[in-house]
Image (cartoon, rainbow, N blue to C red):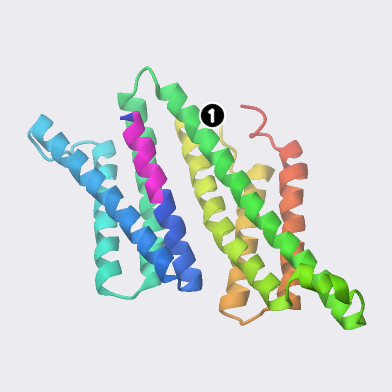
C-alpha cells in the first residue's frame, strides 16, 4: 500500500507539471505526457476501487476516507473526459490541482488508518518530498535569475557597444528571455506541489501548524510573485528588459524568504 500511494502521487505530480507547462506554453508534447500519466493514475485508482468492492462486497463510500478517494477518482475521470472532448485548458488544470489535493488528503488519512507500523516513515517521506519539491523549484528560479542577469549584462554590452567577443557566449537576448520564462514555468508547479505536500505533512504529523508563520506566508507570497510574472508575460504582454528586472526582484524576495524568514520561523525549525 505504501508503494501504491507513493507511485500514484508521483505520477499525478508529473501529470500536473505537464498540464501546467501546456497551459502556459501550449506545448502539445507536455499535454500528451500529462494525459497518459493521468490515465495511469485513474487506472490504478479503478483497479484499487474494484479490489475494495470485491473484498468488502459493497461500494466503499461509508467513511470520510473512502469518500475522499471516490471524490478524487471522479475528478480525474471528469478531467480526462474534458481533456479529450473540449479544449478548455483552464478547467483541466485547476481540476487537476484540486484533484491532487484531494488525493493527497486521502493518502495521508488512509496512511494513518492502514499503515500502522510504517506510518511514521510515510509521514517523514512526505516531509522529504515537500523539501525536495521546494528546493527543486528554487533551483529552477535560480536558473531563471541567472538567465536574467546574463540578459542585463548583454543588454549593457550591446548598448555600450563593448565586449563583442563575449556576446556569442551569452546567447541572444530573446533566447535568454525565453529560457528564463521556461525555467519559471517549471518552477511554479514544483513549488505549488511542494506547498501542498507541506500542508499534508503538517496535517498528518500532528505538529502545531502556524498559518501566520513567516516562512509559510513567505513561501505562498513567493509563489504568487512568480505567478504574477507569468500573468504579466502571458496576459499583459510584457517581455524583455522590464520583465527581466521583475524576475531579478522576485529572486531577491525568494532569498529573503529562504534565509531570513527561515531563521524567524516559529514552525519549520521547532518540530
Q: Residue furthest top?
A: 117
Q: Provide residue 210's location: percent of width, then percent of height.
A: 60, 38
Look at the image and tell me in which quarter the C terminus lies.
top right
Q: Residue at (90%, 74%) from the top-left corner?
A: 163
Magenta residues, dominant SS class? helix
Q: How many marks?
A: 1
User: Does the magenta-highlighted stretch encompass residue 134?
Assistant: no
Looking at the rendering, the stretch of residues picked out in magenta corresponds to 2-12
Q: Is residue 196 visible?
A: yes
Q: Provide residue 120's location: percent of width, then percent of height.
A: 45, 22
On screen, residue 95 above or below 116? below
Q: Residue furthest left?
A: 57
User: Does the magenta-highlighted stretch encompass residue 11?
Assistant: yes
| Left or right for 195, reference 39 | right
On screen, residue 268 above or below 75? above
The residue nearer to you, when weighing 35 against 249, is 35
Quarter where residue 247 is shown: bottom right
Q: Residue at (18%, 37%) from the top-left corner?
A: 62
Quarter where residue 27 is shown: bottom left
Which residue is disc 1 drawn over?
207
| Left or right for 2, reference 232 | left
Q: Residue at (57%, 40%) from the top-left corner?
A: 132
SS class, disc 1: loop
Q: Provide residue 208's location: percent of width, then percent of height.
A: 56, 31
On screen, residue 94 above or below 10? below
The residue nearer to you, when weighing 235 against 179, is 179
Look at the image and tell me in which quarter the N terminus lies.
top left
Q: Residue furthest front?
A: 165
Quarter where residue 82 is shown: bottom left
| Left or right for 225, reference 248 | left
Q: Provide residue 167's location: percent of width, then percent of height.
A: 81, 73
- Neighbour class for label 1 at 10 Å: few (<14), some, many (≥20)? few
Amino acid at each position: 500500500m505504501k508503494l501504491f500511494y507513493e507511485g500514484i502521487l508521483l505520477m499525478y505530480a508529473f501529470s500536473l507539471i505537464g498540464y501546467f507547462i501546456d497551459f502556459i506554453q501550449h506545448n502539445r508534447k507536455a499535454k500528451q505526457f500529462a494525459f497518459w500519466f493521468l490515465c495511469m493514475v485513474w487506472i490504478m485508482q479503478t483497479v484499487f476501487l474494484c479490489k475494495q468492492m470485491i473484498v468488502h462486497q459493497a461500494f466503499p463510500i461509508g467513511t470520510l476516507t473512502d469518500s475522499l478517494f471516490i471524490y478524487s477518482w471522479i475528478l480525474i475521470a471528469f478531467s480526462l473526459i474534458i481533456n479529450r472532448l473540449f479544449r478548455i485548458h483552464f478547467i483541466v488544470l485547476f481540476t487537476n490541482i484540486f484533484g491532487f489535493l484531494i488525493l493527497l488528503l486521502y493518502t495521508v488519512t488512509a496512511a494513518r488508518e492502514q499503515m500502522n507500523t510504517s506510518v511514521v516513515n510515510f509521514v517523514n517521506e512526505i516531509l522529504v518530498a515537500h523539501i525536495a519539491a521546494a528546493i527543486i523549484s528554487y533551483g529552477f528560479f535560480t536558473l531563471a535569475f541567472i538567465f536574467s542577469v546574463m540578459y542585463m549584462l548583454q543588454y549593457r554590452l550591446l548598448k555600450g557597444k563593448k565586449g563583442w567577443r563575449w556576446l556569442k557566449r551569452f546567447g541572444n537576448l530573446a533566447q535568454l528571455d525565453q529560457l528564463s520564462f521556461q525555467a519559471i514555468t517549471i518552477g511554479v508547479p514544483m513549488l505549488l506541489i511542494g506547498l501542498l505536500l507541506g500542508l499534508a505533512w503538517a496535517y498528518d504529523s500532528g505538529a502545531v501548524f502556524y498559518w501566520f508563520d513567516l516562512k509559510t506566508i513567505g513561501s505562498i507570497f513567493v509563489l504568487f510573485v512568480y505567478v504574477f510574472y507569468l500573468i504579466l508575460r502571458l496576459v499583459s504582454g510584457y517581455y524583455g528588459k522590464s520583465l527581466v528586472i521583475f524576475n531579478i526582484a522576485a529572486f531577491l524576495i525568494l532569498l529573503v524568504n529562504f534565509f531570513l524568514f527561515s531563521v524567524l520561523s516559529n514552525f519549520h525549525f521547532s518540530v
